[in-house]
Structure formats: C-alpha cells, structure tokens
Amino acid sequence: MDNVAAFLRYLTSEKNYSAQTVRAYSKDIDGFALHCSDAYGLHNLSKVHYPMLRDYIIVLSKLGLTMRSINRKCSALKSLYAYFQKIGIVEVHPFAQHKAVKAKKAFITPFSITELNTVLEQIDRSDFVGLRDATAIELLYGTGIRQAELIGLKTSDIDWAQGQMRVLGKRNKERLVPIIPALADTLKHYMTQRKVYPGTSAHSFLLVTNKGNKTYPAFVYRLIKTYFRSVSNKISTSPHVLRHSFATHMLDAGADINVVKEILGHESLAATQEYTKVQLPKVQDAYRAAHPRAKK
C-alpha cells in the first residue's frame, strides 16, 4: 500500500487536489482493494486484471450504488493505474479501455425566488446562530459557490474595498467572486458578531458551528435542509440546489453565460450550459399560450 500512499501524495502535491477529494480517492481505492482480497485473495493491486473491475462494478450495482457513484470509483482507479504505469509499477494499464457507463443525469429543480425570500425572511437574526445561518444561505445563493468552497472561506478572503471575495475552488484554483450589497450587509453584521463569539479566535474560517469550530459538510447540509424543507416540496434541498438556483436565476434574468461560468468556477462552458435547460413550468406556459388546441 506504499504505492497507494505515494499516489495520494501525488494528487495533493502535483495535481493540487483538495483534501476532501484525496480522501474520496483513498476510500474508493480501499474499497476495491478489499474486494480483490475477499473475492480473489489478491493483496497486491499491481496484479489486477480488467475482469476484476467488471466484477467489482457488478457487486457495487447489486449493493444499490448509482451509476454516477460507480463511475466516480472507476475514475479513481483509472487514475491510480495511470500513475502506476507512469512510475513503472505496471507495464500495461489494466483499465485503460474501460468506458464510463452512461448514467441518467438527475434533474435538479432550483428553488423559486419566493421560496428563497420566504426562508430568508423567516430566519431570526437576533442571535448569532440565526445570523450565521442566514449568512450561509445568502453566500450560497448570492455567489453560487460550492459547499466545500463555503466551508473553506476565511475572514481574510473578504475584500471589502473591492466588494469581492477570494474563493478557493476545485484543485486549489482561485477565483474572485463579486459580493452584492445585500450580502455585504449581512456579512458585515455577521462579522461583528463573530468577533465576540466564543471559540472563534482559534481559527480564521468565516463560518463556524454553534461551538465556534470550523463547519463541515454534514453541518452545512443539515442547515440548508432544515430551513428549506419547511417551504419547499422539492425532492432535493441540498446546498447544491442553491448553487443551481443562483445560476438558473442569473441566466433567466439575461446574464451573459460566460460571466456566470467565471463566477461558478466552471472549466468548460458545457458545465454552465446545463443550467440553461428550460424549466417545466415555462414549457407548460409556452405550450398553453401557443398551441391552437390548448386554447379554450
């Protein structure tokens, strides 16, 4: 497993992958290693063959994993063996010819502006916790940043003079994101309260838990779900829906798609174009307005 440890260090130092991504790769590799040990009595990952991966995919599918999750695990393994081949541990990449299984893309319905306003108006901002929660929601919706980017924000990332903040995105790529006036007001109020909140002096992360510690994915997920499940009947009420809502509402209002791409931190325009898909209510309205048989 020394070679695996070297691969994980390579992801961190040379590929600039985040700690969260490296942990996910490590977990995916450990799962495959356990499968090889249990199914084949094989403890050396340099000796595997492609049929073992195919068998592993079948096992994962029977366990109920989505094709998206399975593809992610396979991608981690392909990267591992590309590294092994690069440093000479294997001569032939055992999974080089593997193609990701086409997975049905989940359709994410953004929150409506009414739902967002209702949540923000209902939050009691008279205490620190309520103000912190409102700040988290306004940051996610007001800037479109990812959950991991929100968690990683530090107080020094806010540039009050320029009205923007520095965001550390995927693979440690930095970008500057503008801060709208309403968000700036909430941030200033929150920062004032944060300075005197117990425990926050120990670190510089912007958002903190009730105990003053750095936030974490499950904390942010529960925070968003708690507020939005009371005003929305959507299947998903995760933090990512707020990012989706930001992009959808910006594009619906006529924002340039290239500008939205830069704010979101997308590498390709194709990723941003996913948000340009017309929502079902608009399709229904257009149908009723235009089709001759739809008019009474």
Image (cartoon, helix red, strand yellow):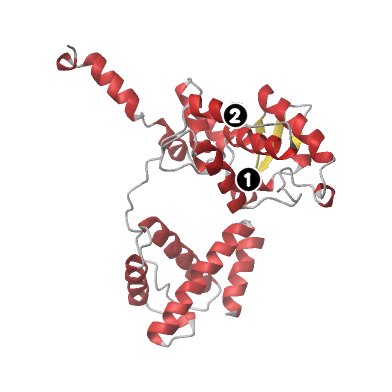
Residue toward you, 97 or 59: 59
Q: Is residue 280 above or below residue 25?
A: above
Q: Name the residue located 54 percent from the left edge and 62 percent from the top edge.
A: 24
In the rendered image, residue 58, in percent from the top left (x then y), is placed at: 32, 70
Q: Secondary structure at mark 1?
A: helix
Asked if residue 267 can be seen in this view, the reply is no
Residue 149 bears which disc, if any?
Answer: 1
Q: Earlier in the sequence, mark 1 or mark 2?
A: 2
Q: Residue at x 55, y 42 (%)?
A: 226
Q: Quadrant of residue 150?
A: top right
Which circle marks residue 122 in the picture?
A: 2
Q: Is residue 285 above or below residue 105?
A: above
Residue 60 in picture, x, y percent from top left: 37, 68
Label 1, label 2: how many angstroms apart (C-alpha)?
25 Å
The N terminus sits in image quarter: bottom right
Checking the image for residue 237, the label placed there is none
Residue 33 in the figure: left or right of residue 153: left
Observer-nearest of 216 and 82 = 216
Instruction: Give the quarter of the image for residue 142.
Output: top right
> Tag 1: Cα neighbours inside 10 Å, few (<14), some, or many (≥20)?
some
Q: Secondary structure at mark 2?
A: helix
